[in-house]
């Protein structure tokens, strides 16, 4: 039996899975990863906004919603780190002169950015 066949009448492509031909998933959209911020928001929705979670889940929009939210949060996170570092005077010169102080101050900046996004 052939691995792939195409139905000339409908134009659908089928793939042999075990003993059965199933519609090949070439046309299915890729699921985007939701990342850490999306996972945290998913947990929040499940615990505190059950109706919103159920509506997104049943409409099939949950993964896209969480992936978009994750991308926005990541962009905001990196922008905040850059802004906070500039505001606190953390430069590449400091990194070259005193690496431990630079790491310490960048960790503080990172935590401030995480708290802001929460």
Image (tube, rainbow, N blue to C red):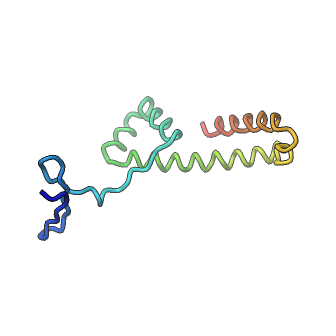
Is 15 situated above or below 88? below
Is 16 situated above or below 77? below
For the point 14% across and 66% down, the residue is: 7
* Side of 104 relative to 31 (left or right): right
For the point 78% across and 36% down, the residue is: 105
- Residue that protrudes farthest toward the front in the picture: 1
- Snapshot quadrant of residue 28: bottom left
- Residue that protrudes farthest toward the top in the picture: 47
Q: Position of residue 84 (x, y in %)?
A: 75, 44
Q: Position of residue 75 (x, y in %)?
A: 61, 50
Picture mark count: 0
Is 79 situated above or below 44? below
For the point 15% across and 67% down, the residue is: 10
* Side of 104 relative to 35 (left or right): right
Of the 4 image quadrants, the one containing the C terminus is top right
Q: Position of residue 103 (x, y in %)?
A: 76, 36
* Side of 23 relative to 105 (left or right): left
Of the 4 image quadrants, the one containing the N terminus is bottom left
- Snapshot quadrant of residue 58: top left
For the point 34% across and 42% down, the residue is: 57
Q: Position of residue 29 (x, y in %)?
A: 35, 56
Is 9 situated above or below 59? below
- Snapshot quadrant of residue 51: top left
* Side of 58 relative to 2 (left or right): right
């Amino acid at each position: 039996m052939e691995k792939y066949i195409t139905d000339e009448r409908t134009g659908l492509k089928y793939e042999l899975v075990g003993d059965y031909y199933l519609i090949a998933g070439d046309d299915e959209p890729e699921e985007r990863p939701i990342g850490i911020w999306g996972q945290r928001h998913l947990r929040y929705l499940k615990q505190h906004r059950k109706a919103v979670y159920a509506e997104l889940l049943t409409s099939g929009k949950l993964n896209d919603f969480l992936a978009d939210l994750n991308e926005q949060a990541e962009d905001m996170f990196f922008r905040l780190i850059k802004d906070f570092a500039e505001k606190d005077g953390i430069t590449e010169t400091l990194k070259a002169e005193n690496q431990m102080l630079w790491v310490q101050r960048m960790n503080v900046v990172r935590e401030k950015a995480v708290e802001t996004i929460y």
